[in-house]
Amino acid sequence: MAMTLRLEPQDDAALTELARAQGVSKNEAALRAIRRQHEQARAEQAFDDALADTLARYPETIRRLGE
């Protein structure tokens, strides 16, 4: 799917610098950044879910560990 990305000049400069450093096009650099951020968000959500599950399942153990 084609898409137009409107960037502020400083963001365009940052993307240009990133693309140059990675030796890829600006399009590829943007895709990599999006994918990296998405994966990080998914990992953070998985951690938050696991923590919530642990706290719900073992509240007494968690309390005792805090003593």
Image: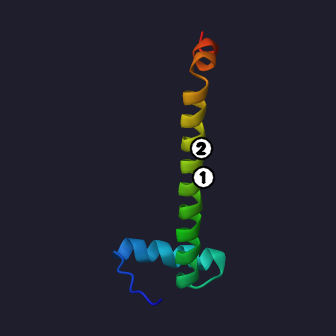
Image position of 28 with respect to 53: above or below: below
Q: In front here: 6 or 62?
A: 62
Image position of 45 with respect to 3: above or below: above
Indicate the amino acid at tag 1. Answer: Ala
Q: Residue furthest front?
A: 57
Q: Kindly check if marks 2 and 1 are in contact, taking CB atoms under 8 A apart as contact.
A: yes
Image position of 21 with respect to 48: above or below: below
Q: Residue furthest top?
A: 67
Q: Residue at x 54, y 29 (%)?
A: 56
Coloring scheme of the render?
Answer: rainbow
Classify mark 1: residues with Cα within 10 Å, few (<14), some (14-19) or many (20+). Answer: few
Q: Position of residue 27 (x, y in %)?
A: 53, 84
Question: Label for residue 30?
Answer: none
Q: Quadrant of residue 65?
A: top right
Classify mark 2: residues with Cα within 10 Å, few (<14), some (14-19) or many (20+). Answer: few
Q: Residue at x 57, y 36 (%)?
A: 53
Question: Label for residue 47?
Answer: 2
Report, in whole angstroms, how far the alpha carbon at label 2 lies from the one at label 1.
Answer: 6 Å
Instruction: Name the residue that disc number 1 marks.
Output: 43
Q: Position of residue 60 (x, y in %)?
A: 59, 16
Q: Residue at x 47, y 71 (%)?
A: 14
Q: Secondary structure at mark 1?
A: helix
Q: Position of residue 32 (x, y in %)?
A: 59, 73
Q: Residue at x 54, y 35 (%)?
A: 52
